[in-house]
Image (tube, coloured by chain):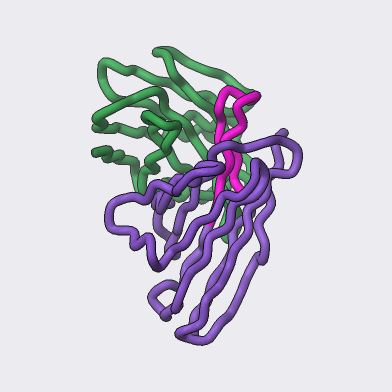
Amino acid sequence: GQSLEQPSEVTAVEGAIVQINCTYQTSGFYGLSWYQQHDGGAPTFLSYNALDGLEETGRFSSFLSRSDSYGYLLLQELQMKDSASYFCAVKAAGNKLTFGGGTRVLVKP
Amino acid sequence: GAVVSQHPSWVICKSGTSVKIECRSLDFQATTMFWYRQFPKQSLMLMATSNEGSKATYEQGVEKDKFLINHASLTLSTLTVTSAHPEDSSFYICSARAVEARNEQFFGPGTRLTVL
């Protein structure tokens, strides 16, 4: 089976940097995805790491270490609109996604 | 990007009735769609994998006779919650796999089901 751990909540101020860690245990692993979900909305895709290293997309970056079963999402230059829940998800065989519990990010002025 | 729609966006029904939720890929063909359920402030839990032209694959603990899935075409999958009860009240979200987008999953906007 799959299990993922990520912090439940993070609070930061506008302009700050936030790192959301995700550790996973999995019986099959193709890659680690990150999704953003605002209250009442659907998850939106942020990034995907299949190989070790850092992927940068604008203000958001994602990192993966397969040997450590660990990844993180880095949110830079935080904006109020970044207040949302962020989920890591392991992609396994059949393109199935198993989601972590989610990290609620609260950005304060 | 790939667009997935769901209908209805919300539904309120009486206990014992059945509710059908549609998931459509609007600008791409999806041989595989996924159905998730999300309770308030919790994570998304995969319910089943819907394959076009074949039976759905259900995750452990999900009753296939209660949650009927039909993937009749490359752009449409339906989830029917049969004999709904208040404990079935949840946010149901579908996703579709886009082969042309590195097999990435694109999520629909979700359907809020409330069973009275």
Q: Residue at x 63, y 70 (%)?
A: B10
- Up the image or down, A42 lies above or below A76; here it is below
- Find out whether residue B99 is within the magenta segment: yes
What's drawn in magenta, residue-wise? Answer: B93-108
Residue at x-position 45% and y-position 77%: B84
Lateral position of residue B30 relative to residue A34, left or right: right
Closer to us: A47 or A77? A47
Q: Position of residue A68 (x, y in %)?
A: 26, 20
Question: What residue is drawn where x is 49% and y is 44%?
Answer: B54
Q: Position of residue B107 (x, y in %)?
A: 59, 45
The spot of residue A61 in percent (x, y) is 53, 24
- The chain letter of the green chain reads A
**Residue B11 x/y as whole percent:** 61, 74
Tally of marks: 0
Q: Quadrant of residue B8?
A: bottom right
Whether residue A108 is visible here, answered yes or no, is no
Q: Quadrant of the N terminus of chain B?
A: top right
B67 vs A41, nearest the viewer: B67
- Observer-nearest of A52 and A104: A52
- Could you say which quadrant of the image residue A98 lies in? top left
At horizontal 37% and vertical 30% (from top left) the residue drawn is: A92
Tint of chain B = purple
In the displayed structure, A69 sits above or below B12; it is: above
Q: In terms of secondary structure, what is the magenta stretch mainly?
A: strand
Q: Nearer the viewer, residue B82 or A96?
A: B82
